[in-house]
Amino acid sequence: MVPEGVGRGHRNHCTNCLTSLHVDQEPGDRASDCGGLMDPIGVWVRKGGEWAVIHRCRGCGKLDSNRTAANDDPMKLMSIALRPLAEAPFPLERIEELVALMGGEGSLSK
């Protein structure tokens, strides 16, 4: 059960998939003409430890963020947060080589 009024009143994203709609130019103004779907591409932590979802519009590419709510799917939030670790921007087999290039010892074994 979600406590009454906990982060549910001013949100335009789906609690299950976290996809949003591009409806604002500035938060809350509902002035955007785009109306595109906004995919959840990341999360960040606001002051005080509150999480927010980073969205990118499929139509125009605008980046925006929305506060998470108590009834958002926690597994979906975690999957988005862990995506950079699961989909590294380089081959994981090259970690030792990259460490060496950065001036480290270059070996992960003891």
Image (cartoon, rainbow, N blue to C red):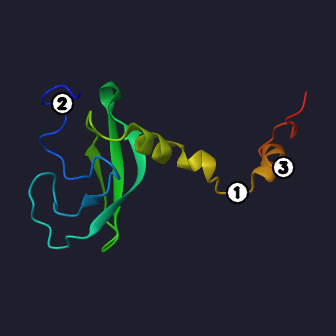
Location of the C terminus (image quadrant): top right
Which of the 4 image quadrants contains residue 76? top left
- In percent of the image, x 47 and y 40: which residue is there? 78
Percent from the top left, x then y, of residue 46?
A: 33, 34
**Marking on residue 48:** none
**Residue on which the image places disc 3:** 97
Q: Compute the Cα span from label 3 to label 1.
A: 11 Å
**Residue on which the image places disc 1:** 90
**Residue on which the image places disc 2:** 6
Q: Compute the Cα span from label 1 to label 2.
A: 39 Å
Which of the 4 image quadrants contains residue 67? top left
Q: Amino acid at mark 1?
A: Phe
Percent from the top left, x then y, of residue 2?
A: 22, 29
- Depth check, front residue: 15 or 101: 15
Are the residues tagged 1 and 2 within 8 Å (C-beta)? Answer: no
Q: Earlier in the sequence, mark 3 or mark 2?
A: 2
Location of the N terminus (image quadrant): top left
Is 58 above or below relative to 28?
A: below
Judged by depth in the image, the label closer to the viewer, 3 or 2, is 2
Q: Earlier in the sequence, mark 3 or mark 1?
A: 1
- In percent of the image, x 19 and y 53: which residue is there? 12
Is 49 situated left or right of 66 in this image?
right
- In percent of the image, x 26 and y 52: which residue is there? 14
Is 68 above or below relative to 38?
A: above
Judged by depth in the image, the label closer to the viewer, 1 or 2, is 2
